[in-house]
């Protein structure tokens, strides 16, 4: 059974937690896009683990973890994270693999990311994580990127030097500090022996696993509304976090995918700039932030919070082909007397959009249309069986399913591993 798991909103839906849960029945967990802009949290007992590049499946001994060709990987971030994973007591030997086709995020990509963001006009700022993601993907599609396999070539350090000199021209034009080519060459010299043990032909590896009947689990980072094609462009990331990205980012055919799971937070959050129709700048928004612990796992920024948006969830269901939902953070809504679901965006002249417009200016003239439902005002975090949920919580979930399509597969009622209900997958 090969499963693709994607985020359905603007990220931070709880993908890490659900991947950890599904890894039990998988043999290999594969990251296929994004980079260390991701922050995936897994809580086991009283320990909290945050993973950025390494698949969240690494917390299960004996499972293989792959960084596929679609990822952009900063070798320094990766080395730090691998050391951390080992310090947590997990053995990496023979079970962690990086594609030789994976592009690297270099120091100058990070510098360019920050300089480009600083140079953007106030209303054009993206609020990037500053991890060099945009410039690394720009280098990839511009066909001057550096791939992991390049570290094995004799001219690797010469290319580093040439690229720093080139990047300095752009940094200078942006009024940013330039990088010292000699220092960069010194910095990257030890990268070769450090990365070597993990570099693999992951396409071959994954296909050999498939031939032997292994189960692959594809771990999406970011989410549908941050997708470079389907998200709120230009306020997006630079990859395809949607389901199709799992194939292009790993070398596994769409024919091999058996099911697609979308992770859906039962309210909405966004970190960074860009439109967010159901955003709440009031006490309810603050309540969601505090109860949900909505502070970025990568940058620590407070997340913007709002009611559940069925327009984007329906859109996510369609563009990803979501079979099952993993709904998360029900417990965060436990105290609200009323919960709201956005079913459309109403223009001043009364016209209601029920699909997400490509032209973001349209949203400036729209108000969300809400359906209100009574809250359940009781604790759900101890519940282990779907039947035991309060009737109003079930009604809320069922109304969402009615509006967005797909089936409920997993329900999460707390951050810890045990607070996960398997429904019908
Ligand atoms: P990801 O990027 O999609 O993996 O999500 P993050 O890890 O960035 O953010 C999700 C946060 O919510 C983390 O702090 C999780 O520990 C937490 N979390 C996940 N599921 C639940 C849940 O059902 N209830 C509560 N209260 N917290 C949850
Ligand atoms: P996970 O996997 C939430 C947002 C940034 C910014 C935009 C572009 O934890 O859900 P980038 O650094 O990618 O160029 O930033 O995308 N962003 C995320 N928001 N969760 C994430 O990952 C994100 N990764 C990027 O805040 O608005
Ligand atoms: Mg996150």
Image (cartoon, rainbow, N blue to C red):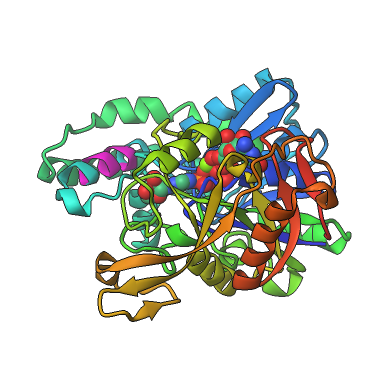
Q: Residue furthest top?
A: 87
Q: Nearer the viewer, residue 203 or 298?
A: 298
**Position above or below: 4 against 172:** below
Residue 343 shows in the view: yes
Residue positioned 33% across, 43% down in the render: 109
Residue positioned 83% across, 44% down in the render: 24
Position of the C terminus, as image quadrant, is: bottom right
Residue 133 shows in the view: no
Q: Can you give x and y, in whole percent of width and height, for residue 366 in the image?
A: 30, 68
Q: Can you give x and y, in whole percent of width and height, for residue 384 in the image?
A: 83, 42
Q: Nearer the viewer, residue 358 or 173?
A: 358
Q: Can you give x and y, in whole percent of width and height, for residue 214 in the image?
A: 85, 56
**In the displayed structure, does residue 17 sit left or right of residue 34?**
right
**In the displayed structure, does residue 345 sit left or right of residue 66?**
left
Residue positioned 55% across, 43% down in the render: 336
**Position above or below: 233 against 222:** below
**Looking at the magenta stretch, what is its main secondary structure?**
helix
Q: Is residue 81 magenta?
A: no
Which residues lie in the magenta part? 109-116
Q: Nearer the viewer, residue 162 or 210?
A: 210
Residue positioned 68% across, 22% down in the render: 47
**In the displayed structure, does residue 86 sit left or right of residue 238?**
right
Q: Nearer the viewer, residue 285 or 154?
A: 285
**Position above or below: 174 against 275:** above
Report the number of discs.
0
Position of the N terminus, as image quadrant, is: bottom right
Q: Quadrant of residue 380?
A: top right
Q: Can you give x and y, in whole percent of width and height, for residue 45 in the image?
A: 75, 24
Q: Is residue 115 magenta?
A: yes
């Amino acid at each position: 059974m090969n499963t693709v798991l994607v985020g359905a909103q603007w990220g931070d839906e709880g993908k890490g937690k659900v991947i950890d849960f599904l890894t039990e029945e998988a043999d290999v967990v594969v990251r296929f896009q994004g980079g260390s802009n991701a922050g995936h949290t897994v809580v086991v007992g009283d320990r909290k683990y945050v993973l950025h590049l390494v698949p969240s499946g690494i917390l299960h001994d004996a499972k293989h973890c792959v960084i596929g060709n679609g990822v952009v990987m900063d070798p320094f971030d990766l080395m730090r994270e691998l050391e951390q994973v080992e310090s947590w007591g997990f053995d990496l030997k023979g079970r962690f693999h990086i594609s030789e086709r994976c592009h690297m995020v270099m120091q100058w990509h990070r510098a360019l990311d920050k300089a480009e963001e600083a140079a953007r006009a106030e209303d054009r700022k993206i609020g990037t994580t500053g991890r060099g993601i945009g410039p690394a993907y720009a280098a990839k599609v511009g066909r001057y990127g550096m791939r992991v396999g390049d570290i094995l070539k004799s001219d690797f350090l010469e290319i580093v030097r040439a690229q720093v000199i080139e990047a300095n021209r752009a940094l200078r034009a942006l009024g940013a500090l330039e990088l010292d080519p000699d220092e960069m060459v010194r910095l990257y010299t030890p990268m070769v022996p450090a990365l070597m043990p993990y570099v693999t032909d992951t396409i071959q590896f994954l296909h050999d696993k498939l031939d032997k009947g292994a189960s692959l689990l594809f771990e999406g980072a970011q989410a549908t509304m941050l997708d470079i094609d389907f998200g709120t462009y230009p306020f997006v990331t630079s990859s395809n976090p949607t389901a199709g990205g799992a194939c292009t980012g790993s070398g596994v055919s769409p024919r091999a995918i058996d099911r697609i799971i979308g992770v859906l937070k039962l309210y909405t959050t966004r970190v960074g700039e860009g439109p967010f129709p159901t955003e709440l700048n009031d006490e309810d928004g603050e309540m969601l932030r505090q109860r949900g612990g909505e502070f970025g796992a990568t940058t620590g920024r407070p997340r913007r919070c709002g009611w559940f948006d069925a327009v984007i969830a329906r859109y996510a269901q369609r563009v990803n082909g979501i079979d099952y939902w993993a709904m998360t953070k029900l417990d965060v809504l436990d105290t609200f007397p009323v919960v709201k679901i956005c079913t459309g965006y109403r223009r001043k002249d009364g016209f209601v959009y029920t699909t997400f417009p490509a032209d973001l200016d349209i949203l400036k003239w729209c108000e969300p249309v809400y359906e209100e439902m009574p809250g359940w005002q009781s604790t759900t975090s101890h519940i282990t069986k779907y039947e035991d949920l309060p009737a109003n919580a079930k009604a809320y979930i069922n109304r969402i399913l009615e509006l967005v399509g797909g089936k409920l597969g997993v329900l999460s009622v707390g951050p810890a591993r045990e607070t996960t209900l398997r429904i019908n997958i």
